[in-house]
Image (cartoon, rainbow, N blue to C red):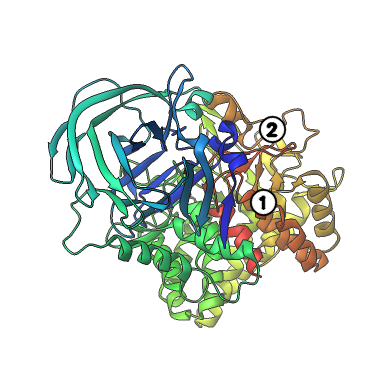
Amino acid sequence: MALRIGPETCHDLDAALSREWLVTNGLGGYASSTIAGVNTRRYHALLVASLNLPVQRIVLLAGLEEWLLTAGIDAQPLSAQEYWDGTVYPDGFRRLTEVEVDGMLPIFRWTIDGRIIEKRVWLEHGVNRTVISYRLLAGPPLTLRLRPLFAHRDYHEQRHGQGGFDMAETNDGWVIDAGGVRSYFEVRPAPAVRSRPDWYWRVLHRAERERGLDDEEDLFTPGVIEIGLDQRTEVVVVAGTEPVPAGWSAAASLGAAQEREASAIDPMADNPLASQLLVAAQQFRVAKDPRGRTVLAGYHWFTDWGRDSMISLPGLVTRPGTLWEARAVLETNFRYLDQGLIPNRFPDGGQAPEYDTMDATLWMFQALAAYLRVSGDWRFILERLEALEGIIDWHVRGTRHHIRMDEADGLLAGGEEGYALTWMDARVGDWVVTPRRGKPIEINALWYNALRLTADWCERAARPAGHYREMAAQVYESAQLRFWDRGGGHCYDVVDGPQGDDPSLRPNQVIALALVYPLMEGDRARQVVAAVGGRLLTPYGLRTLDRDDPRYQPAYRGDQRNRDAAYHMGMVWPWLLGPYLDAHLRVHGDREAVRRLLQPFQQHLVEAGLGTISEIFEPEPPFRPVGCIAQAWSVAEVLRHALA
């Protein structure tokens, strides 16, 4: 299925800047920009390479200026750039007539002076190499002038000031050394290379300005390349961290990229949304050093997070043909198991993993159950059953951040000043926006499931299981007594918190209905679905707070503090639609309602991150997509239900 964007959107600068494309290489590296060609984020570039898979990402080739030269006619641009004062120059988007996204691979077409020019961008899998091709589809020959712009800096930063770049001219481009990294820029067939090193000053990244962050950058250019373009000759640009190998073919490279995308589509998937999301799902599944696999939480700025991986796994990689990846991701997390916890996050700089999470490890039990259900790979569970029992033991006697079972009621409690341990983890400096200290509803639903699943697996392995069943029964009984808010007609979000029990209407309670073993059933489950569906449900997921709550935030704007303050105080999260639909199906059994609730995402595929699903949406019409343009659990949970 190809997604298409027409000239009316391409020529509207604001509309074009709000639509971003993304291609990835399976290593954590990527290329991405807006369809206008303007880099609006510090994360936009034609080549972002991962130096320590899948982290330590560095922006190498930031962009390309592209001009068409013809005799007797002024140079015509294909590219566009915005500067600090709002000047947009050049303005090639005004001649852009169509953008097509084939899978996740973007194709751009311009119509200029009777000519049609097509450009494609793709990344090679398993190597830090971007390929860009240009073809003249119609019209007389012309000359293509290209000026590469390099940054060579960490992808969270901006480059400022002159200096620090060494360059060497080659027959077909340049070798660039800067920031401790070497990159290669080559053009085929043999071009005219004109070296003239220079700097482009104060390039604007408007999305960073909107976020109140450093928003300007200075870029280095080694010169220009000119090459003839006619209907018989394809011009190919290759940028990478190593030279192009002998015998390399652009046609074979593109064919491999297209074949990889096509192979992701399940021929049994009978709807366009599922087919597209199967391709998008590949972007999050990446290598993690030579020893394993992992899931990137989102693009552009997230690395691999344990919680996100475990929530995403059932939707991303629990189908025939991908089960080996699910197993490998699970193996990676078992490898880092420490004091009964898997990591919350692997930092960008390759530092030691962080274990500040209360739920990531408990979500792993759900991921294991999903893997076992599809694969039948009981040996994998059996070989790790002792480790799983060790996780339960650590949670009973206590682990990091005061995470410990309360012996009085069997419920799991946790929390520590300055930390946010659940998925609602926004923090600004020392300010924890949603601390949720105490006994959160979804944590105890996950704890109940961990106990019951461990009991199931121990029984199958002929190991003692009665203790786990007794603990689970206590959790279930305590939950019925403690979590039900009779006055509100729904569950407390947290009980035994520093201020007592929290009656806020939040979406976390649907998780208690959606797991392998529901913690709330019967009339209470129906009331939860009604309350959440009536007050939190939007076309793109669930609000994180009731609109009538005085803390409710209707917009995601301003600096980082303002945005983080709204992150879990009203913003809509698409991933929550997954457990909501599970709960809805349990209560009502209405699959037609599921299909109806997924329909808005079809249009969303061409509204923000092309071909994928955003991290969050604003909670009021028109439900503007914000946050990351591509989020693993957003894609995974919508895909899981689209395939059902």
Name the foreground residue: 312 vs 376: 312
Q: Residue under circle 1?
A: 603
Question: What's the amino acid at mark 2?
Answer: Gln
Name the foreground residue: 594 vs 621: 621
Residue drawn 21% across the image and 45% down it: 191
- Residue 629 visible in the current orientation: no
Q: Quadrant of the N terminus?
A: bottom right
Counting every numbered tag in the picture gives 2
- Left or right relative to 492: residue 398: left
- Residue 200 visible in the current orientation: yes
Q: Residue under circle 2?
A: 499
Where residue 240 appears, as percent x and y from the top left, is: 25, 48
Determine whether the residue tagged by mark 2 lies in a helix, strand or loop: loop
Determine whether the residue tagged by mark 1 lies in a helix, strand or loop: helix
Where residue 434 appears, as percent x and y from the top left, is: 61, 35
- Left or right relative to 423: residue 473: right
Where residue 116 appears, as percent x and y from the top left, is: 46, 48
Residue drawn 70% across the image and 57% down it: 598
Label 1 crowd (10 A; few <14 / some 14-19 / many >=20): few
Task: Give the image quarter of residue 457.
Answer: bottom right
- Left or right relative to 628: residue 178: left
Q: Earlier in the sequence, mark 2 or mark 1?
A: 2
Seen in the picture, residue 369 relative to 543 is either above or below; the reply is below
Where residue 461 appears, as percent x and y from the top left, is: 49, 81
Seen in the picture, residue 179 relative to 629 is either above or below; the reply is above
Name the foreground residue: 101 vs 261: 101
